[in-house]
Image: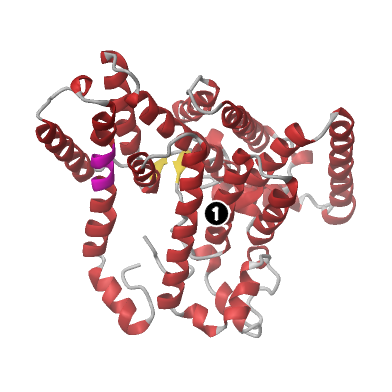
Amino acid sequence: MFRGLENHPGYYGSTYQALVPQAFPGDAFMPIGRPTMLSLYYLLVKGVGPLWLDDRFTLLVFFAMTVLSLVALDKTVRLLGCGSFWERAALMAFVLLEHKFFITHVLLVDNYGFNATALGGVIAVWLLYGALAGWSAGRQLPLGILAMGMSPKNCWLPVLMAVVLLWKERLGSRGKLLSVLAAGLLAAGGLVFYYTQLRPADGSHVALFDYILAKMDDQESNPFLYPLWCNLLFGGFCLVGFLPLGLPAEAMRRIRTVAAIGLLAWLLGGLYLSTAPDALKIPYLVPFGFRRALRWPTYVLFVALGVALLKWLQKPPSAIGVWLSWFCFLGLYLVHLEFRSKLAVLLGLSTLGMLLFYRRFSPIRLSADERLKLAAVPVLLGTLGLYAIGAVHQRSAALRHLARTGIVGGT
């Protein structure tokens, strides 16, 4: 899935400029200290040096990011109650497949560019695991600070979710009251500073707000710009977090908090970007991308639902429960903006092969372990077939170009 350095046009030239500050002299679009370069990522680039421009090196870094993210996912899955090999392997393959369905978006490792956003996502996955596991403030807060230093745009919602969980679980009534007052004063101070020091009197910030929103509306800002049924789908997905999923009680309480924060971020962000009067249009808020941030509560709920479906599939058989769990698990695996017919065929053939292997053609007649494998094996083969075989074969020329030149071809 690696597409090379700065595949996204919003970051073109940034890595080179971090290494060569005098680059692009007089270019109005490449000023030193522009918002996209306010990240710890560029300190890392400077530390490594020109080697960072070689895609053969950054491919290895991307691979390490993928491994780290998979470890965090595996720990999350085990925390939620899946400890066997087949459960853990199935859920890794289940989440590794890129799932994009308008505002319901699950992507374990960002592959649209190699930049601060991608590295911030790895930290966010670990922070969400720590929040669900109930890590202490001494472990979560440094990770949250690192995430915000790396990519505030990508990590603000995971950090907020972790802070809210700490606030709920670790503070007494007095501490909660004082922290709310402090947050209110900080927000008020920020608004006073903005309106007195940053906002020009000529109304240009209103125009800038509208311009940024129009430029980003098809990607990452306002969820309300998508059709009503897409928003209802996201709301319904969040409501899954309030169902009795049969997961460990402590983790389930935290998942409900994540779902509630996701719903609030969707609602408040959509209302603000859709209905804010000119006096409240602050252009600095738009690039945080409320729609894009919704990927993080979706990720948590997607993993929780996958765990629940595998657990239900292994319970004492009832015809409706077994068939429903099995179809929902495979159906959720296939959810994507574009239906992958080859993947569906591979899923069907591997399922048929498993039933022939067991010589029983109804999941209800299989043992709990066999029912688990009936879901796990097709999903494993599907992800391996799509990525390890199909994608590598399709990109073989690009990878040969990478080996020769240090630049990924075909991007």
Q: Is residue 382 magenta?
A: no
Instruction: Please give the name of the residue rendered at 68% of the width and 59% of the height, measured from the top-left corner.
Output: 146
Relative depth, front residue between 391 and 273: 391
Compared with 294, 126 (above or below) is below
Element type where label 1 sits in the image:
helix
Quarter location, residue 254: top right
Colour setting? secondary structure
Is 28 displayed left or right of 300 in the figure? right
Mark yes or no: residue 283 visible: no
Q: Which residue is mark 1?
A: 121
How far across and how far down the image is residue 32, in percent?
Answer: 69, 74
Identify the image quadrant of the N terminus.
Answer: bottom left
Is 195 displayed left or right of 29 in the figure? right
How far across and how far down the image is residue 22, in percent?
Answer: 65, 85
* Callout 1 crowding tier (Cα within 10 Å): few <14, some 14–19, many ≥20: many
Instruction: Please give the name of the residue rendered at 90% of the width and 51% of the height, measured from the top-left corner.
Output: 196
What kind of residue is marked 1? Gly
Relative depth, front residue between 226 and 98: 98
Identify the image quadrant of the C terminus.
Answer: bottom left
How far across and how far down the image is residue 404, in percent?
Answer: 31, 83
Mark yes or no: residue 298 visible: yes
Compared with 6, 400 (above or below) is below
Q: Main secondary structure of the magenta part?
A: helix
Compared with 383, 173 (above or below) is above
Stretch in magenta: 376-381
Quarter location, residue 128: top right
Is 62 displayed left or right of 291 in the figure? left
